[in-house]
Image (tube, rainbow, N blue to C red):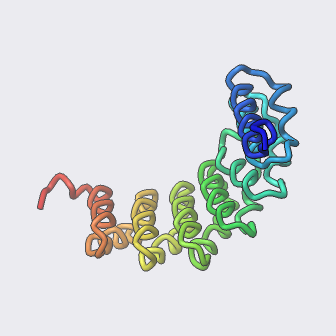
Amino acid sequence: MSETSDPALEAARRRAKAALAGHAGEEAVARSLLDDPDPQVRGSALGALVRMGAARPADAAASLADPDPITRRYACELGATLPGASFADLLFDEDDMVVEAACYAVGEVQDQDAVPSLVLIASDHDDALCRESAVAALGAIGDVEGLPAVVAALDDKPQVRRRAAVALAAFDGPVAEAALKRCLGDPDWQVRQVAEDVLGLSAEGD
């Protein structure tokens, strides 16, 4: 097989072409790659349009509805830089990596309407990365309706508990403060450190 007939190499070249178009402001080139057969090329083309400020709400909608999870995830990872995007529908995507990225995106745009869905993911999703991302998004949004789920996440795996401790900083009141104080006794030192930082105890020393 010759070098030029290698599909992976050709796709890599098209991704590079898309990336260069974004830096050079070549909108037509980027748009020509939005329908590329390779999902990573499609994602790179969308990113190029975002970089040059030429992305449209229709581009966002098409990428978020893309049949391949790679493109859907990439679109979510663009977050607030993707104009006119509605990420909440992907919170229950069939692909866990898309769900994780969608949680990040709704948190970044502070979509308060997504809080009930984030609560469900933080509480019940099978994938720990999705639960962690949902907890982080609840902290980013800071809606009091999400506080019980953040507190409940303190009984999850260490990485989720760490994220919950960080998220608690977004909430005021006795419930959040009590949860942070509970974190001071967590078996994971990073959870304890976060709680100390948020409560302002780190400077007091051991």
Residue for point 79% across, 57% down = 68
**Location of residue 184 by image quarter:** bottom left
Q: Locate the N terminus by quadrant.
A: top right
Up-down: is 22 above or below 2? above
Residue 59 at x, y percent in the picture:
83, 41
**As drawn, is 134 to the left or to the right of 204?**
right
Residue 159 at x, y percent in the picture:
43, 67
**As drawn, is 60 to the left or to the right of 135?**
right
Residue for point 75% across, 37% down = 3
Up-down: is 70 above or below 13? below
**As drawn, is 8 to the left or to the right of 194?**
right
Residue 106 at x, y percent in the picture:
65, 55
Front one among 196 and 56: 56
The answer to whether residue 46 is seen in the rendering is no
Residue 205 at x, y percent in the picture:
13, 57
Residue for point 74% across, 46% down = 8
